[in-house]
Structure formats: C-alpha cells, structure tokens
Amino acid sequence: MEAGICYIKPEYLVTEVNNGSEAVTTENNETNKRKREDGEQVEAGGKKKWDKKERKRGQNKNRPVFKDERYSHLCHSLIDGTGGEPCSLANCRYVHDLDAFLAAKGEDLGPECYVYTTKGYCARGVSCRFARAHTNEQGRNLKREDYDEKAPPTTCNGVSSELQVRLRKHEYDFSRSKELIKMAEKLRDARKQKEQQEKDGKQEKSEEVVDASAGEKQPNDALEKGEQTDSKEPATQDNPTVAIETPTGCAIDDSTAGRDADQKPAVDFREKLVLSPLTTLGNLPFRRICKEFGADITCGEMACAQPLLKGLGQEWALTKRHQSEDVFGVQLCGNNPNMINQAAQVIHETAKVDFIDLNIGCPIDLIYQQGGGSALMRRTNILELTVRSCAVLSDRLPFTVKMRTGIYADKSVAHELLPLVEEWGASAVTLHGRSREQRYTKHANWTYIEECAAKAKRMPVIGNGDILSYEDYVERRTLAPHVSSVMIGRGALIKPWIFREIKEKQAWSPSSGQRYELLQKFCNYGLEHWGSDTKGVETTRRFLLEWQSFLYRYIPEELQTAPPQKINARPQKYRGRDEMETLMGSGNAADWVKLSESLLGPVPEGFSFVPKHKANAF
C-alpha cells in the first residue's frame, strides 16, 4: 500500500470515468497522488519543465468577502415589540420602523427558539429568526414564568464599556506592569553580565594554561593573584552579578505557601487532554462541544495584545468563557514585552482566567513579519523579558508558552529554548513537533518532542501534533514518556469526540445521524452565543462552514480497510453508507453550504464560501 493514502473498502469506492471511455476505480488509479499543474513546457534537450506548484499553506487571503445587507439593527426600544418606551436618543442610528424591519427579516427558520427554550427569555425579541416561539398575538416578546432575571450569565469575560473607555483614554493603571518589566530587565542584564564574566574567566584560564606550558608562568600564579572562581554566593540586590537562582514557576505546585488558604491553587497540567487554541475555529460553541466530549483544559483563540489594549470589542470577544470551561486560559500574541505584560495584567485583573499562554509558534506571515508569533523564538532577549515579567504577575496565574520546533525545518532550536523558558519562570510549555516553515505538512516529530521534554527539570511539557485516534495517543505517549500531557488541535476539529475515545480507550464511530445532531448542537450553541437574529444566524453559519471544512475529512472506521485513520492520509474517493454520510464526506464547499441550509435556512442571495485556512486540506 502506498503511504499517505487512506484505503477504502471496495464496496464503498466510487467508480469514475477516465477520458470518457474507460471506467476505473480510485483503487487502481492515481487520483489521490499530488499531480503537477497543467501546462508543461519543454526545455532545450527535450526535458519537461513544470510550473511551480501553488503552495497549499497559510490562508486564502483573496477569498470573496460576502456582506449581507439584510440585517439592519432594530432599535432596542422596539426589541420586545410595540408598546414599549420610545427611543430617547435624538440621533439614534438604528431602525425604528418595526413593520418594515419585520417584512425585511423574512420568515422564521423554525418553530422553536433554542435560547427561549433553555433560558425562558430571548433577548433578541422580535428580531429573532424564531420569534413566533416567544411572541404573542400582539407581537410582544414573552418571558416564561420560570425565567430568573437575577441568574448569573452562562458566559463571562469580554470588555465592559467602562473598561473600554479607560483603555482608550490611557487611564488604566499599568504601574505594576512597568515595575515587572524593570525587574525583568535587571535580571536579564545580571544574567548577561554573569555569562560574560564566566566567558572572560574561561578565556583567561585557557591563556594561563598555555603560558604555564611554555614555562612563562607557574601553575599557581593565577591563585596567588586571587583570581575569582565560580561563586555559589546567593544573589542580592547589592550584588546582582552573582549567579541568580531563579525559582522555577511550576503548575504542579499545590502548596499554599504565599497564598491565602481560600485561594485557588495553581493549575495542574499533568495527565490532561488540552484543546489547542485554534484561530477562527476554536470559538466558544466549539469549545463547549469539546468539553462535553471530555477535554480537560480549554484555551481561547489567539488574541493580539495591541488590540486588547485599545479596547477593541472584537478582540476582547476572544477572551469569553463559558461556565462549562472549568479550566480556561487566554492565549496572547505580540512583539513587545511591555504590551504583552500590560495585556496580561488587564486580563488578570478584569477577566476570569486560570492561566495565560504566550504564542511563540504562530506561523502566520503578518504576525511573523511584525516580530510576533514564531519570530519570538529568535528574539530571545524580548522573549526573556516577556516570560520573566508575566510569570511573576501573580502566584495564582500560571504563565505558559506554546512553541514550535523552530523557524526552519532543518534548524530546530526548541531544545535550547525550552530549558531557558523554564528558568525564566514559565509554568508549562506546549511543543508542536513542526517548524514554522513546515506549518502543517510532513509529520510531527515526537522524537524531538521527547528530547526537549527530557531537558525540563520540573516544568510540565505538553506535546502537540498529529493525534487523531486513541492509537495515535498511545503511540505518542509511549514514544515520549517525559511528556506530561497532550494537546490536540486539528484532530479535535476533524473528530471532536477524540477526547472521549482517549478516555474510554476505544474508538467511537458515530452514525451520520449522530454527526448531524452534533452540527445541530453547534448551531444551537452558536445562536445562544452570537445571537438568534439574522446577523447571529449568518455568523453561526460562517463558523459552521469553517468547521465543516475540517469535519469532512473524518472517515468512518467501517469504511476503511485498515483503521484507524491517519491525520494526513488522503482517502480514495468514496460514498458513505447513506446519503447524509456521503454529503458530510464531500470536499466540495457547495455541499457544505447545502448542509448549512438544512440547519440554518437558505443562504442570502449571492452567498459564497471559501475556507479561511488552507490547513483544512490534506
């Protein structure tokens, strides 16, 4: 069998027509291999010259951006229908013609509103696309008798209007952050000075040995002159040049030293299943589903420090947390230690998070070119300031780092960087077994992950890459015994039930009906999170389609000749056991849109969809 191909049982293979005359099956042809692009050219000597292949990596930056003009916002004074208090704003920019708004809204998408059913009140009121479920004959929005207005919200975090104003007017007090940066600079400078002294000392000793061998100096001359040797004297404020024994921050410290008795201990990162922070796709509804399948630790999508400090609501939305996420962290990205530390401070002081993670592995070109993401792996001075200052922000807020093997495929640096990050105070490190240059191609190097994990003294190391089944999990843990936990990213996008498989130690092959119910649950969670009005419905649809661009890669075990499926293995062209399973396995975006219409109603006129991330492909 050829590597890189997921072979399908013969009864499920699709027969294709080759050149209009010969019928062949994908079992015998080469449709699953990478093909050169059309348009070959011939060089001198008769050799064939092929055009350069388009790289299937990064983002689809030129994809069409669809703007739906149907959902003009209804004024809040009319949300519950007619008969309420009139709008008090003279220049209100929202819609005040209720009849015109309802006519443009279109028909309801279904007889039941998930938000009203679960909470007893739908805040979208008459603008909800399921409004008939909670409006009376007069068009007034209803509240169930069991609705509790004082009940705490199911989600938290985000930015308040008061905090937004303070950030935009630069009135937030960041004096604590500035002190931590100054302290980190002193520690860094002291370390550099000590290293320089050691380097000069070794150089002097080597010169003395050469001189002594030539008879120009006696062996004990150096001692007679009182030259310093390595000192074990502890560092003090008066003597910062002495070796600094920085206490290693560790997430497995359950002691109460330095904490109040009622304060929550640090997060334990050992033997956990961690959901990777996933840009665009790691949204709150998706994380809820992963929690239900058994994910132990979740993390929000990567948030950039600068927009957070500007109070941008869209960036702060990435910090939102659902009540089901019992261990939740926020991942930060930036290129400046001051900004990153200030963002960490404001999140610590205003949001409910269990840890903060620093992304130094992001391969996105824009982030890298600005000096953030994986570029920090070569900017060690900036990285040291960032980790040192953020690690001491609070003894109850672990600061973790997520990195790759390095920038280039042939030059790994994580084995040198990981012990330094531990020395600087990181509570845990996640290592993705690929370089920035590789992105998601080739296989994750778990042998190298184990090599790096073995260099950590006490700090937990979390391995990441290419886990799509329980068998993959066991194989990687056996290969890397020093790894404390495992983080799963694309594997969870393709199979969100992978957490259940690992904990139950057996494969689970859901039917097409069960998978469809999973999509329904995502849509319900999306309508609850983004809103059940037209804008919320289309936002939910967009994220559903982005997720489906990974979900389609799942191949039921009953269809494979040699399960389990490998994450980068391309399947032969196949049909499912029923029409829905065939539709869910289609790689055609038009089929994904068709699937979304069965869940969220028809798409707007002129709608089209192209996945954001090229990593959705094999």
Image: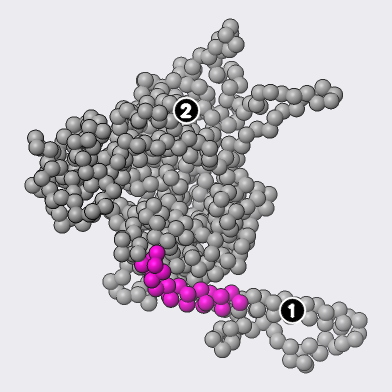
Q: Which residue is mark 2?
A: 587
Tell me the element at label 1.
helix
Which of discs 1 and 2 lies nearer the camera? The answer is: 2
Residue 300's spot in the image, x, y percent?
Answer: 40, 52
**Earlier sequence position, callout 1 versus callout 2:** 1
Q: In this rendering, does residue 398 appear at all? A: no
Q: Please name the residue shown 62% across and 34% down the image.
A: 54
Looking at this view, is 355 or 256 the one in front?
Answer: 355
Q: Nearer the viewer, residue 510 or 148?
A: 148
Q: Residue furthest front?
A: 90
Bin the neighbour count of mark 1 within 10 Å (Cα to Cα): few under 14, some 14-19, many 20 and up. Answer: few
Name the residue tied to disc 1. Answer: 200
Q: What x and y, as percent, mark residue 342?
A: 45, 67
Instruction: From the viewer's side, name the closer residue of 259 and 106.
Output: 106
Start-end of magenta stretch: 166-189
- 462 or 161: nearer the viewer: 161
Q: Is residue 429 magenta?
A: no
| Residue drawn at (35%, 64%) of the image | 165
Q: Position of residue 251 (x, y in %)?
A: 43, 64
